Image (cartoon, rainbow, N blue to C red):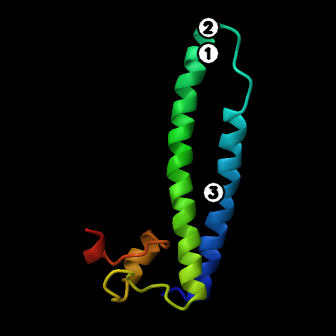
């Protein structure tokens, strides 16, 4: 069973990873487009994939930030909907989850 401090360390590490990766994606999306028409089409497809990844990671980043707020407020590990304790197993898999399994389904 992990302590709240261990969970906080884990969440902060993930926040750092996400932030770095989002900056990498942002840099790639800001690159100048190729002058070759065919190459630009491939770049647009790649950009769409990067944007999708970025949106997914941005959502996770917000969830991690919210989990850190719940830690600071002493509410981490409890479902934001029903107030029940979130199982350790669920927190092991989804440390930023705001909901118990029942409320998440």
Q: Residue at x 61, y 80 (%)?
A: 8
Q: Give the distance between the C-alpha atoms of the residues marked 3 and 1, in whole angstroms.
A: 27 Å
Q: Check residue 37 in the rendering and tell me which mark sits there, or answer none.
A: 2
Q: Residues within 10 Å of mark 3 (few under 14, many from 20)?
A: some
Quadrant of the drawing holding the C terminus:
bottom left
Q: What is the quadrant of residue 13 in the picture?
A: bottom right
Side of 5 where 79 appears, left or right: left
Q: Residue at x 56, y 28 (%)?
A: 46
Which residue position is annotated with label 3? 18
Above or below residue 20? Residue 46 is above
Q: Give the distance between the C-alpha atoms of the residues marked 3 and 2, in whole angstroms.
A: 32 Å
Q: Secondary structure at mark 3?
A: helix
Say which of marks 3 and 2 sits in front: 2
Asked if labels 1 and 3 touch by Cβ distance under 8 angstroms, the answer is no
Side of 32 where 98 appears, left or right: left
Q: How many discs mark residues in the rendered view?
A: 3
Q: Residues within 10 Å of mark 2 (few under 14, many from 20)?
A: few
Which residue position is annotated with label 1? 40
Q: Residue 44 in the image: state x and y as whole percent.
A: 56, 23
Q: Residue at x 70, y 15 (%)?
A: 34
Q: Secondary structure at mark 2?
A: helix
Q: Residue 36 in the image: state x and y as whole percent.
A: 67, 8
Q: What is the quadrant of residue 98 in the picture?
A: bottom left
Q: Earlier in the sequence, mark 3 or mark 1?
A: 3
Toward the viewer: 84 or 6?
A: 84
Q: Residues within 10 Å of mark 1 (few under 14, many from 20)?
A: few
Q: Secondary structure at mark 1?
A: helix
Asked if labels 1 and 2 touch by Cβ distance under 8 angstroms, the answer is yes
């Amino acid at each position: 069973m992990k302590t709240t401090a261990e969970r906080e360390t884990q969440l902060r590490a993930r926040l750092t990873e996400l932030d770095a990766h989002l900056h990498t994606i942002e840099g790639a999306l800001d690159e100048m487009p190729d002058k070759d028409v065919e190459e630009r089409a491939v770049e647009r497809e790649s950009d769409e994939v990067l944007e999708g990844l970025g949106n997914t990671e941005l959502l996770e980043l917000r969830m991690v930030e919210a989990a850190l707020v719940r830690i600071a407020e002493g509410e981490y590990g409890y479902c934001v909907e029903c107030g029940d304790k979130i199982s350790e197993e669920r927190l092991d898999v989804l440390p930023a989850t705001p909901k118990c399994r029942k409320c998440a389904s």
